[in-house]
Amino acid sequence: MSKKKNVIARVGNFEITKDSGPEHDYIRIKAIGGHWGISHRDDSPMYGVWMMMCQEPDYAKGMEVIIAMSYTLTNSLLDEGFMRDFFAACEAMNKRRIEAAPKPTDQDEADAIAEIEMLEEAKSQITD
């Protein structure tokens, strides 16, 4: 008797399931043939990313590319040159993300400082 699967998306020859365990939930991406799979636990940022992508049809091509890349990377013998190039590309992507992140306004910074001061004051009152 087969176990019932909670399939939340199908991408090419892969199924994405959401499984619940006693302590954690998991997103599992598996080849339909059963020969390959990857999992993300609910305390991993990728769990939320995959949950969001599975709910949005616009992400179907992106999911396909990520799965193909993950499959290739986990089923290949990679040389040092490739790994150096790969990590350089990851570093460049992170730099682009940081540069594209919204910059806090002076008001945002003032509000954050005021909130920290308020929390520090409350903390000192509690501990005194």
Image (tube, rainbow, N blue to C red):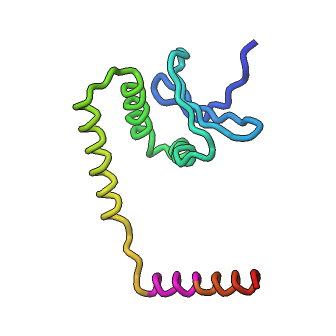
Q: Nearer the viewer, residue 108 or 30?
A: 108
Q: Position of residue 6 (x, y in %)?
A: 67, 31
Which part of the image, by quadrant, shows the N terminus? Answer: top right
Give the prevailing secondary structure in the magenta stretch.
Answer: helix
Q: Nearer the viewer, residue 59 or 127?
A: 127
Image quadrant in which you'd find residue 67: top left
Q: Position of residue 53 (x, y in %)?
A: 50, 45
Total residue callouts: 0
Which residue of the protein is positioned furthest toward the top in this rendering?
1
**Residue 108 falls left or right of residue 28:** left
Q: Residue at x 54, y 41 (%)?
A: 54
Q: Residue at x 42, y 33 (%)?
A: 64
**Residue 38 falls left or right of residue 68:** right
Segment tinted magenta in the rendering:
107-116
Image quadrant in which you'd find residue 104: bottom left
Relative height, residue 94 to residue 65 (above, below): below
Q: Residue at x 49, y 43 (%)?
A: 57
The question of residue 110 being in magenta is answered with: yes
Relative height, residue 41 to residue 124 (above, below): above
**Residue 10 falls left or right of residue 70:** right
Q: Position of residue 80 (x, y in %)?
A: 26, 30
Which residue of the protein is positioned furthest toward the front in this rendering?
128
Which part of the image, by quadrant, shows the C terminus? Answer: bottom right
Q: Position of residue 66 (x, y in %)?
A: 41, 36
Relative height, residue 116 to residue 51 (above, below): below
The question of residue 95 being in magenta is answered with: no
Q: Residue at x 64, y 36 (%)?
A: 18
